[in-house]
Structures are given as C-alpha cells and as structure tokens.
Image: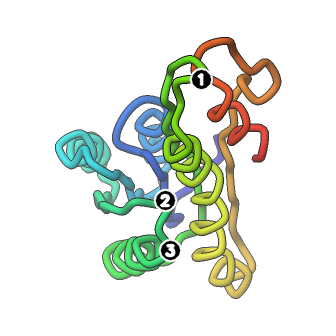
Amino acid sequence: MKDLKNRIALVTGGSRGIGAAVAIALANAGADIAVNYRERADAANAVCGEIAEMGRKAIAVQADVSVAAAVKRMVAEAEAHIGGIDILVNNAAIAHPRKLEEITEAEWDEVLTVNLKSVFLVTQAVAGAMRQRKWGHIINLSSVAAQTGGAVGARNYAASKAGL
C-alpha cells in the first residue's frame, strides 16, 4: 500500500473483523482513521487504541449507517476531529443466517438497508468534498456470496452484496 500520510479514512463497520483489519492496515500505511461502529463501542475504542499506538489519529464514531441523519452526523463528527475524509471503506454489513422461509420481511429489509443503502448514504455524504479536493478513494466491500448465494440465510445477504 502506498504512503497514506496526511490522508484520512472512514471505515464503516470498523470495530471488528474485516473492518478492523482494514482500519489498522490503512493506519499502518499512514492514514488517520475514523472507525465507525453501531453497537460495539468497546471494540471500536480498542481499534482506535491500536491505531493511536502507531502514532496515528483515530476516532470511534457511533452511527447506524442505514440512517441518513446518523450518517451526516458521523461524517461531521469525523471531519471535526480528524479532517475531511479522503478514503471511504464501505464495510458495514449484517446477516440473519436462517432458512429463507424463516426470514421475516423486516429482517430482509434490514439487511438490504444496512448492507446496500448505507453504501449510497455514506458515499453521498463524502463524495462532494472529495470532488472539491480533487482526491478521494471509495472502496465497497462485497462478498463471494454475491456470486454463490447460499442455502441457509445467505439470500438476503447475497442480494445485498450483489447489489454492490
């Protein structure tokens, strides 16, 4: 990864798993990081602690990225604390692993909203400033499930990831 010194990244779903690994890798390359989380403040703060140990700035920012007002607040908070977002990693995702006939309509909608609509909302919130600065990268994380689906619980997840 090239030098990302003086760059600022926002990683949605950055408190654990792939999101945490991406946030730490970007910090290793020199970026300051906004770690988004929905419910796991302790995990997000732990990731920020690792990043701070590298000498990089980090902020944990709570937001449900499927809600437009929460996204706007998250971006404003990140920008106020560490600066304008140069790199966006759309990583936030959920799944309800059950048989198709057991998934409720509300669960179907929640998965598509969190996994797909959030990408639109967060990208829309940062793209204008990236254009003004004439620099920016947006990375959308999909899944092999987009191509393969699955027998148990992956249909709504697969549909959302295929949408990316």
Q: Is residue 9 left or right of residue 41?
A: right
Q: Residue lying furthest right in this view?
A: 147
The image's mark for residue 139 is none
Mark 2: amino acid = Leu
Cβ atoms under marks 1 and 2 closer than 8 Å: no
**Mark 2 element type:** strand
- Which label sits in the foreground, 1 or 2? 1
Q: Label 1 neighbourhood size at 10 Å, few (<14), some (14-19), many (20+)? A: few
Q: Which residue is mark 2?
A: 10
Please provide percent x and percent y for residue 74: 39, 71
Mark 3: amino acid = Ala
**Mark 3 element type:** helix
Q: Residue at x 71, y 24 (%)?
A: 145
Please provide percent x and percent y for residue 103: 53, 30
Q: Residue lying furthest top in this view?
A: 151
Q: Label 2 neighbourhood size at 10 Å, few (<14), some (14-19), many (20+)? A: many
The answer to which quarter of the image holds residue 4 is bottom right
The image's mark for residue 68 is 3
Q: Which residue is mark 1?
A: 101
Picture layout, residue 82 above or below residue 118:
below
